[in-house]
């Protein structure tokens, strides 16, 4: 059992009473922590550790870990390795007695624990050129490492490099829940992971989808908000239109898709953002002016997005298409001979598994017409009838991609989501070089 506590600083003294009271309440319930993580603005002093260990009945000061402020959150795992948390866990969980784990418990990188003080995190020192020099010298010192040990070296390099990023990339998020940005937390983290992969500082710009709609200006007198929203769009290096439910802001998302398509701004549409791409293309390229989703206009003459037939509209609860499902790249090449950029970003995999959360889909009856008009449905479900990925060929647009699934759910710091990675590469003007490098 672990316990996280705050150690405030008052009058230049680190106060242990909140931690003591928290552990006392925990022990009154019959629970006794093995390790105590102490959040503090500054490095925890040895006297503070000893006092907490004594009054909170843990095995010793080594079981009281300092989790002080660092330059970025990705330093925290390194900070805990430096304080030998992995050794404590292996000991308390008796991992050394498991034969299958023999030889895999040394998360210290074959002696890097002895040089872990080079990170200087326990001393409160930020990134420095010394550390990056060690981590980046061709890794010849770490060639024998594998598994978790090698991962920690990769993680350390990522964390320290993040502190040194100078160039910025501006990404606009066009959403309808911008007042509560935690609604898009997975999207934010995916963009962060992708920005680390391209070694750029991420600047997020929030745009309320409804403010991009001309009707918002005309009907609500929101000329100021309308103009400000479009100024933000024009400053973007790339645009993400994430998912959502309900009619508010949908036309704004359609306008965002149109602007990015016509202005050659890298665009990634997710779920409803993908459907907005389809509606926009149908309206402005196929001239189906009333094209829409039946979620918003049930009697439209051109329903390009419809309610999935296997779902009962009258039954509420448990009606979404959820979970991990396969997407096959059924159209990996375009007529101009170029390869699908989405397939390339997935390592040229023929089938990928991603997580879903939706009730509406692209109308199968309209698919061939839209596809032949130029918006290519390169990824489809295993039956070939449900559209999963759409894109424009790179001869027409640097990066114009939409997916029905939610790729942000599987993004990781050292393994960014491929669609987000592609967006950031395109936004930084690095996509062509990246693709060329894959061919070598």
Image (cartoon, grey):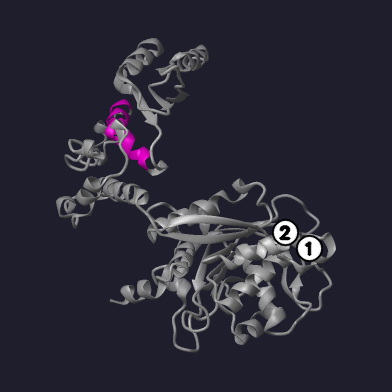
Q: Which residue is mark 2?
A: 225
Residue 310, visible in the rendered structure: no
Vertical side of 334 occupied by 118: above or below: above
At x 76%, y 68%, the residue is 214
Q: Which quadrant, please, contains the C terminus?
A: bottom left
Q: CA distance from mark 1 to mark 2?
A: 9 Å
Q: Residue at x 26, y 48 (%)?
A: 153
Please report the residue visible at 67 percent of the width from the left and 66 percent of the height from the top.
Answer: 253
Residue nearer the viewer, 11 or 97: 11
Within the magenta stretch, is there residue 43?
A: no
Helix, strand or loop: magenta stretch: helix
Q: Which residue is situated farthest in the front direction here?
A: 224
Q: Position of residue 300 (x, y in %)?
A: 81, 74
Residue closest to the eye, 157 or 101:
157
Secondary structure under badge 2?
A: helix
Q: Which residue is mark 1?
A: 216
Q: Residues within 10 Å of mark 1 (few under 14, many from 20)?
A: some
Please report the bounds of the magenta region as a residue range: 75-92
Tell me if residue 310 comes above or below residue 433 in the rendering: above
Observer able to see residue 332: yes
Looking at the rendered image, the quarter that the N terminus falls into is top left
Q: Position of residue 270 (x, y in %)?
A: 59, 63
Contact (Cβ within 8 Å) of mark 1 with mark 2: yes
Q: Quadrant of residue 339?
A: bottom left
Indicate the secondary structure of the residue bearing disc 1. helix
């Amino acid at each position: 059992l672990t316990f996280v506590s705050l150690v405030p600083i008052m009058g230049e003294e680190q106060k242990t009473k909140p931690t003591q009271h928290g552990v006392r309440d925990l022990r009154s319930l019959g629970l006794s922590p093995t390790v105590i993580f102490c959040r503090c603005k500054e490095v925890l002093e040895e006297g503070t550790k000893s006092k907490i260990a004594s009054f909170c009945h843990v095995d010793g000061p080594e079981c009281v870990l300092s989790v002080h402020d660092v330059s970025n959150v990705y330093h925290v795992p390194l900070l805990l390795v430096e304080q030998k948390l992995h050794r404590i866990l292996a000991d308390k969980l008796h991992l050394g007695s498991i034969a299958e784990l023999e030889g895999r418990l040394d998360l210290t990188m074959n002696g890097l624990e002895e040089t872990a003080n080079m990170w200087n995190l326990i001393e409160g020192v930020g990134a420095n050129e010394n550390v990056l020099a060690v981590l980046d010298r061709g890794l010849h010192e770490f060639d024998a490492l594998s598994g978790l040990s090698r991962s920690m070296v990769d993680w350390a390099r990522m964390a320290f490099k993040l502190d040194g990023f100078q160039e910025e990339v501006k990404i606009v998020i066009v959403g309808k829940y911008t007042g509560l940005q935690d609604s898009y937390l997975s999207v934010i983290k995916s963009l962060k992971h992708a920005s680390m992969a391209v070694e750029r500082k991420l600047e997020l710009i929030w745009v309320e989808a409804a403010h991009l709609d001309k009707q918002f200006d005309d009907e609500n007198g929101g000329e100021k908000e309308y103009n400000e929203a479009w100024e933000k769009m024009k400053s973007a290096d790339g645009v993400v239109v994430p998912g959502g439910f309900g009619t508010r802001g949908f036309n704004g998302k359609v306008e965002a898709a149109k602007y990015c398509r016509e202005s050659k701004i890298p665009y990634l549409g997710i779920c409803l953002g993908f459907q907005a791409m389809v509606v926009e293309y149908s309206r402005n390229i196929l001239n189906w002016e009333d094209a829409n989703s039946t979620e918003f206009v049930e009697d439209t003459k051109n329903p390009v997005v419809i309610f999935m037939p296997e779902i009962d509209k009258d039954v509420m609860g448990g009606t979404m298409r959820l979970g991990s499902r396969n997407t096959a790249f059924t159209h990996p090449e375009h007529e101009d001979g170029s390869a699908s950029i989405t397939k390339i970003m997935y390592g040229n995999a023929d089938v990928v598994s991603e997580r879903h959360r939706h009730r509406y889909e692209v109308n199968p009856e309209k698919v061939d017409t839209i596809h032949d008009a130029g918006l290519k449905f390169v990824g489809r479900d295993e039956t070939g009838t449900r559209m999963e990925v759409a894109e424009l060929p790179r001869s027409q647009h640097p990066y114009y991609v939409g997916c029905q699934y939610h790729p942000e759910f599987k993004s990781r710091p050292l393994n960014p989501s491929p669609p987000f990675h592609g967006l950031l590469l395109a936004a930084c003007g690095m996509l062509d070089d990246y693709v060329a490098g894959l061919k070598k």
